[in-house]
Image (cartoon, grey):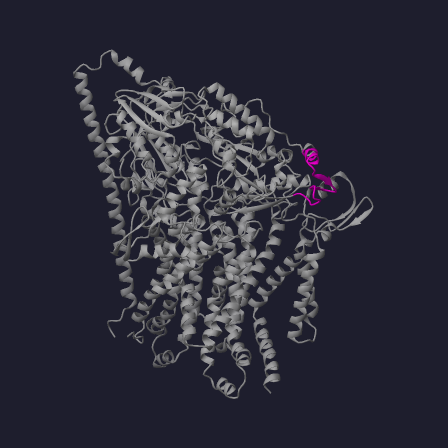
Amino acid sequence: MIPTMLGITALVFFSMALSPGGVAGPLLNQVSRLNTVDAKRVREYYEKRYGLDKPAYVQYARWLNLISPIGWRPNPDGSLGGFGFKWPSLGESLGRHRPVSDLIEEFLPVTLLLQAISIPFVYGFGFLAGITSARRRGSAYDNFVGVSQLASWSVPTIWAGVMLIGFLANRDYISLFPSSGLHEAEALNMAFFPHFTPQGWQRGWLLDCIWHLILPVVCLSYGGSAFLTKLMRGSVLENLSSDYVRTARAKGVPENFVLYRHVLRNSLLAMITVAASILPAMLGGSVVVESIFSIPGMGKLGVEAVENRDRELVLAITLIGGLIGLLSTIIRDVLYAMADPRVIYD
Amino acid sequence: MDNRFGVKDFVLVLLLLIIIVMIALAMFQYDRQWTVLQQTNQQLTELTGDVARVRQRVEQGAFATTQAASTQDMYTGLERVVKSYSSPDYAEGDTLTMVSQAPPDKLTPVVSTDLLSFTIQGEVMDALLGRDPDTFAFTPNLASDWHVSDDLLTIDFTLKRGITFSDGSPFMADDVVFTFELSKNPKLEAPGEQSLLDHLTSVEKIDDYHVRFHFDAPYFLSLITAGNTPILSKAFYSKYSIDELNQSTGLLIGSGPYRMADPTSWTPQPGQPIVLLRNERYWGPRPSFNKIIWKIIENPSARTTAFTNGDIDCYGTLSFGPSPESFDQMLKNPAIVARTQHYALDSPVQGYFYIGWNVKVGRDGPPSPFADPRVRRAMTMLCDRQRIIRDILHGYGTICTGPFPPSSPQADPTIQPWPYDPDGALKLLAEAGYVYKGDRVYGPDGQPLKIKLMYPNEGYVLKRCIPLIQDAFARAGVEVDPDPQEWTVFLQRTQNRQFEAAVAGWGGVIDNDLYQIFDSHFSEGAGDDFTQYVNKDLDAAIEQARITADETKRNELWHKCAQIIHQDQPYTFLFIDREMTIMDSRIHGVEPTKVGLNSPQEWYVPKALQKYHD
Amino acid sequence: MTETAVQTMAPSLANDVTGRTMRRWGARLGLTWIVLLVLLAVFAPFLANSRPLLLKSHGHWSSPAIENLTPADVIIQAVFWTTIILWKMPVSLRTKILIELAVLVSTTIGALVWVHPSELVIYETYRQDERAGNVEKVINAPIPFSPDDHQRDLEDAQLKPPDSAHWMGTTENSADLASNMIFATRIALSIGFISVSIAVVIGVIVGGLMGYFVGWVDLLGMRLVEIFDAVPTLLLLLCFIAFFPRNLYIMMAIIGLTGWVGYAYFVRGEFLSLRDRDFVQAARAAGIPLRSIIFRHMLLNGLTPVIVSASFGVASAILIESTLSFLGIGLVQESSWGALLEEALGVGGTFYWWIALYPGLAIFLTVFAYNLLGEALRDALDPKLR
């Protein structure tokens, strides 16, 4: 796992360092308004502090030192202190002058919330649609589901988001939903649950959150659920034509029982195998959704960091992205082991 | 077989998880309400203390008829505010709501870097001097009097007495000394700020209410440096170490009309508004609004929606303003026009857009076609600036004629912009050796004239400007090749002088110093004279103006600079966009001035129109 | 026996697959749309051009449209017509490919040397001439606007809804939307095709190497695959594309470089299963060189899932490019469907429905077409459904 993480972060860092503009983006922004003498001083100050004048591999090595629990302790002015155990730190964002861990603390929960709400919809919908179409194989319903599944998988997220906002969240058309953000500004003064106040009915923080999340969740989940529908259908079909089902039917077991007791559990294996790739795919999708709906999450932070060449932030986000990817692989293996009694890990 | 993990169990686990999440969210909400309660309690305690103190002093007979006189002395510099507050419909109360695009990264003064934090600090803190928005003269603020020595090396300030910060600690000379010493501390993470204080050697405390500033070289902006810097409270800020200040996000306290509810604990939460409360201990007339709130709405269409819904009172000045399209769109709606007031004002802080022509090929290379001022003037005459303002800014802009804002005394009012005159331009080009043949302009070397126009790929204004410029030049036979670059690369290229022509903008201030931008000292290295323009006459005029103490003589020199620049056109000055503001018409006291709208300190809402009562 | 037998084997497998695929209505639909797009892309300068196709002015005939074709236009025309002519000719596939390459190279050189469209473009002159009555006869393209014609002769032409003059309305820059969309077809198709080709080539090479020379080559390769697999693709692409100049070719290369993983996996799997098969062992024992074993036997079998995956890959490449252009990180100067879509949500909150509908629909239909094609290919190649 560690070599993979090293590889990813090295790849990203060196492509950033080797690109025109280099790593010093926010630095250039700082000095662009000052005269030569002052610009020189400011540049020297930042270079010493963040090591921006050193060659790329040295900068990368310094970052590695920063995140490892054993290493040279960094001093605030940029030099290195004693060797030993230390708290791993993600560094400080050059563009925002704040510790990266603070930024991640603020932005990650929003993205995770979005994912957490979308995943049940993705799986639930895929599940139902897959099973029902497998049962009625070859019928008009099955064909319809098949075509609409492929069609909705082909709808670009950007188009879906723009059309939804344009028609459903726009005062010129139907103004049913809010067009952006996670909360109205008033929501912070609202109580948690909806209730009646002297001024009228108040939405409450919970409902307000849900109302803001409906469109983004729709945008995030339609693609994944289409994909899962197909997978589920294929898996159920495969199981329905297997030997043990034939035996059960021959024994006289009712069809529903066969379906729900036996076939389902085995079909779940296919869904779980795919679970590992759903989360990273949705993280990618969330970049787009967060940008369109102006939701302050990791995707948006990532786009901004990359545009500003904010070295620490980009590396930290890559690290987290990779970690989440690897984590979902582990979760998938665990779920697999739980669901399939045939699987034994030693 | 019986203890398999079935569907039932899964559903149960899911329900359990949902309940746990709900409980956690409810606890979070409860916690937040508790914090609000705490703040209210603290406010109450402070107010009770104040009332008790006032009652004490009344009983001691401290409020004799001398009160009126001392108030008058205190209020010098705030005449505009006093005048506004004496309107017949004046009332205290209500909340003023503004909007901004993103929360500031930090609110702690000196280490903060973005525009919104400066704006908020402007409401919470005071500086020694103020500025009249129409005459640009300096007015007393925290200082009642000041004197600048003839050699520009010493400035004396007399401070007002009886002023306290919002936490009750008194304002005295120690605070002024502390402010500048802290700002100059090299360990503080504010290298940009410190460069402005370069010429300041020390601030000397003469006595509790007199300070003297010492400078090492004469510079006409020294008074502004000393007078416009917000003063920090020594009692409050000296409690923190330099590291703590560097790391902090929200340590903001001052003597201004408004204050933070909690001066120590603000952090930038996305989506959370920034709330300022009235400073009951303010030394000037009691501020009119109960609260000033900045809502943070990132999406431009959401901002417009929030304004049209009435959730925001003021969309424009002091915060993020509407684009020309939104502005026009809102003004087309009669319902909105009926309940709002709108302004599109020229302001010196808007800055200007320009095209910089590199007079050499690369850094220190042979002269480029733009080394000849006739060619540069021809380029200016080929830009249809009126059309740019009409099409892209929807008319909300002015043609820019030079580096000084038109309302500033530094600008020469007799200068007229070069007209859009393609024929005249072609004549000038012909004089310089660039002939129009067929449908193209050919240079003296026989090659057609082709310009690579580099611009930063940010913001829609430039993106739409470039095709207009390209088409206008094409009609005259000059080929323009747009070269969009990322901001970082753009900066790098201008610093390395690797470009032919670059479109960019400078921000604006009331008092402009042309030294960094046009003096030939800065044509080398990474200086800001990135077009490598050298003009000895201009250098002399600039350098003389910088050290001239007398304002009239100085402005004459600046006029001379403006004339030289106008004839030589090192830049093609494009346009200045206007500050557009649309606000709820219930807010009275709003007046246009030469720096845009007047300060919100002068605004108020009459009793009958007040909307928010908490 | 091997030489001729394999040569006759391969074409019949291809014919077999093609026949089975075309029987499916999904493939027919998808292919129809793709052919339509190809036609639009090839004939774009004749379909949407501000310059008249035929002009008689002052008694003098001319064709400004043809005189101002860019080298790219000329090359595309040449390649297209060569393909059409060679389609039904009874020559071997190898000869056809060689002829195509020859035509491509010669036209490129010739076009770069001889084709010089005028560099200064002033589109308004044609319309102004027409209005002034200086022209006797003029035949315009069906859409008489070029994609970069900003209609400077009109007062206010930006962001207008569809009407009789502009069938799909106008964009932010006062340019005709329909014409922009037709030229954006070129970008979509070329990005799809070229980036997937790059990805397939890299994937096949890496996967083949891993599958053939197992051992440390395989281990190293697997680590590389893991790296590219673990990070969410969009994030990785974001990083790469934002760091480099916004050039069409660089974008193609980068999308290709991030998408090769799936193909490598397939090829490796195929190779691993085949290398221990009897016929391969026999071939090696008989002394047949390595190269022909790989190309004749292993590759052909391993390529079938790659082809299916490639079709989905093209769809995904088009989606990626649209998304990046939409986010403002993709192409800057050329307009692509994604970049056009970005203008739909105006800065002030106005929704320009025509700018949202048409480019979005184009992206959707193209991606759908490639997905349908991929599905049909997969069903055709799946042994279980035969």
Q: Is residue A170 above or below residue C108?
A: above
- The reply, left or right, for residue B9 in relation to residue A226 is left
Q: Is residue A332 above or below residue A100?
A: below
Q: Position of residue B237 (x, y in %)?
A: 26, 34
Q: Is residue C29 visible?
A: yes
Q: Position of residue C96 (x, y in %)?
A: 66, 72
Q: Nearer the viewer, residue C18 or C10?
A: C10
Quadrant in which the C terminus of chain A is drawn: bottom left
The quarter holding residue C35 reads: bottom right
Q: Is residue B614 visible?
A: no
Quadrant in which the N terminus of chain A is drawn: bottom left
Residue C64 part of the magenta segment: no
- The reply, left or right, for residue A10 in relation to residue C356 is left
Q: Position of residue A72 (x, y in %)?
A: 29, 55
Residue at screen point 29% across, 41% down: B248
Q: Is residue A122 above or below residue C275?
A: above
Q: Nearer the viewer, residue B80 or A52?
A: A52
Q: Is residue A248 above or below residue A184?
A: below
Residue at screen point 42% across, 45% down: A26
Bounds of the magenta segment: B425-449
Q: Position of residue B521 (x, y in %)?
A: 50, 35
Extreme-top residue of the structure: B65
Q: Nearer the viewer, residue C382 or B416?
A: B416
The quarter holding residue A87 reads: bottom left
Residue B430 part of the magenta segment: yes
Q: Nearer the viewer, residue B200 or A168?
A: B200
- The reply, left or right, for residue A139 in relation to residue B613 is right
Extreme-right residue of the structure: C59
Q: How many marks are shown on the rendered structure?
A: 0
